[in-house]
């Protein structure tokens, strides 16, 4: 696996098991995002006090920041079930109707990647969210007719990496709009230590900090790195993740001291070589990646860490990025005359 597979927080099959094993089960286990967690706790307590389900919630934020975990925590706090699905699985209104009609009062319906719902499914969901009823077509051909079916009151929890793609009408149907932020190193180090306990491996404090610093502000990435560091600790050391073990593991995975992986470095070098702002499309082509991947996976980290800037004319390097690129790739003799 290249460093990219580790640093990408959008997950894959192998992550599903890891995510489940390490998923925080309640607010106490959910590290960081304090303002958001405090608000949610109040809203949940208030809804419970009234004996009502919680209003619909929309979580937005980059992949791997904890949106799914929060949906499950909400259900648990509300003593309800969480039914999870994702927009690509809801191709037709009938797919959604099947799930909605099987909900119990108070259940949480979690829809991941909710910005990907087709317009017709999205509109079908409106009525369900607002009036707790849906139209279902029965019979076929000339005798086909639609009947209104009441639904139990439920809480929709939507998750999106692209809040901007959700129409205003859809967004306004959520009672709570919560944005998850990239995590700071302290929170990530705490997550690393908690995950190490669950994975039954000892991690030294400075090792947890080293891993945290290189985890792109993302718990899912941090967890993946702990797991690989554990492999190195087990095979190459005495089983403990020391700073040295962590550093070796990270280096072997191609993640440098700045937390940059192969594609990050290529991206910085591509901007440096271009010597002018580059559009995201051009950048995606240069990297052989989807535009969405560049925007959701690589750029947010590189911008947060001050390597690149997004300007109206395109992406360009910051001074820090420029310094790094010059050191990584000394200019060919005479190249300076080009500018
Ligand atoms: P998303 O749905 O935003 O992609 P997830 O909720 O699936 O993210 O989180 C990915 C994994 O990262 C979780 O399984 C959990 O192990 C870890 N994680 C995310 N947020 C936190 C947090 N605040 N505290 C502890 N672990 C977290």
Image (cartoon, rainbow, N blue to C red):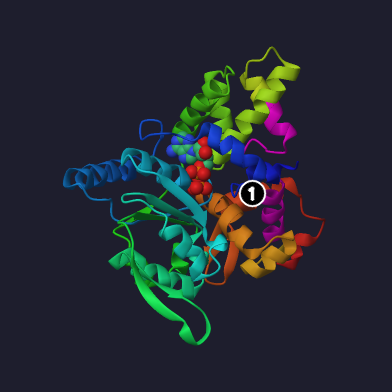
Is residue 245 visible in the rendered structure shown here?
Answer: yes
Q: Which residue corresponds to mark 1?
A: 323
Q: Which element is circle 1 on?
A: helix
Q: Is residue 305 left or right of residue 152?
A: right
Indicate yes or no: mark 1 CB to ligand 1 under 8 Å. Answer: no
Residue found farthest to the top: 238
How crowded pointer 1 is (Cα within 10 Å; few <14, some 14-19, many 20+) is rated as some
Q: Quadrant of residue 267?
A: bottom right
In the image, residue 336 lies at what x, y percent? 74, 61
Quadrant placement of the N terminus: top right
Instruction: Check the image and report above or below for 231 versus 30.
Output: above
Out of 248 and 179, give the one closest to the viewer.
179
Residue drawn at point x = 80 percent, y = 60 percent: 334
Residue drawn at point x = 51 percent, y = 24 percent: 193
In the image, residue 144 lies at what x, y percent? 47, 82
Residue found farthest to the bottom: 142
Residue drawn at point x = 42 percent, y = 81 percent: 145
The answer to if 319 sits in the magenta stretch is no
Q: Which residues are magenta?
A: 247-272
Q: Quadrant of residue 234?
A: top right
Residue drawn at point x = 71 percent, y = 26 percent: 248
In the image, residue 192 lies at what x, y percent? 53, 29
The answer to if 250 sits in the magenta stretch is yes
Quadrant placement of the C terminus: bottom right
Out of 148 and 226, give the one closest to the viewer.
148
In the image, residue 60 lies at what x, y percent? 43, 55
Q: Is residue 294 left or right of residue 38?
A: right
Instruction: Check the image and report above or below for 337 versus 5.
Output: below
Instruction: Check the image and report above or below for 177 versus 15.
Output: below
């Amino acid at each position: 696996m290249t460093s990219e597979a580790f640093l990408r927080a959008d997950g894959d099959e192998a992550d599903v098991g890891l995510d489940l094993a390490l998923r925080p089960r309640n607010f106490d286990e959910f590290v960081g995002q304090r303002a958001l967690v405090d608000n949610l706790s109040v809203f949940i307590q208030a809804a419970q006090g009234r004996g009502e389900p919680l209003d619909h919630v929309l979580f937005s934020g980059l992949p791997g920041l904890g949106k799914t975990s929060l949906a499950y925590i909400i259900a648990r706090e509300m003593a309800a079930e969480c039914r999870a699905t994702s927009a690509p699985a809801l191709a037709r209104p009938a797919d959604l109707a099947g799930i909605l009609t099987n909900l119990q009062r108070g259940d949480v319906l979690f829809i991941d990647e909710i910005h990907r719902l087709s317009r017709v499914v999205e509109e079908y969901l409106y009525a369900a969210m607002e009036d707790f009823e849906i139209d279902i077509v029965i019979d076929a051909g000339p005798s086909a007719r639609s009947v209104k079916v009441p639904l139990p009151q439920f809480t929709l929890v939507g998750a999106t990496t692209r809040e901007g793609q959700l129409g205003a009408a859809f967004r306004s149907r959520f009672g709570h709009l919560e944005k998850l932020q990239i995590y700071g190193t302290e929170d990530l180090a705490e997550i690393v230590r908690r995950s190490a306990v669950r994975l039954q491996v000892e991690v030294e404090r400075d090792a947890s900090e080293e891993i945290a610093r290189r985890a792109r502000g993302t718990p899912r990435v941090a967890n993946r790195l702990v797991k690989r560091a554990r492999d190195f600790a087990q095979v190459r050391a005495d089983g403990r993740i020391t700073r040295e073990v962590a550093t070796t593991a990270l280096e072997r995975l191609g993640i440098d001291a700045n937390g940059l992986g192969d594609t990050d470095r290529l991206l910085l070098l591509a901007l440096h070589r271009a010597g002018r702002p580059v559009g995201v499309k051009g950048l995606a082509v240069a990297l052989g990646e989807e535009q969405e991947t560049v925007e959701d996976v690589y750029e947010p980290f590189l911008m947060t860490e001050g390597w690149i800037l997004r300007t109206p004319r395109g992406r360009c390097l910051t001074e820090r990025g420029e310094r790094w690129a010059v050191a990584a790739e000394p200019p060919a003799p005479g190249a300076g005359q080009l500018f």
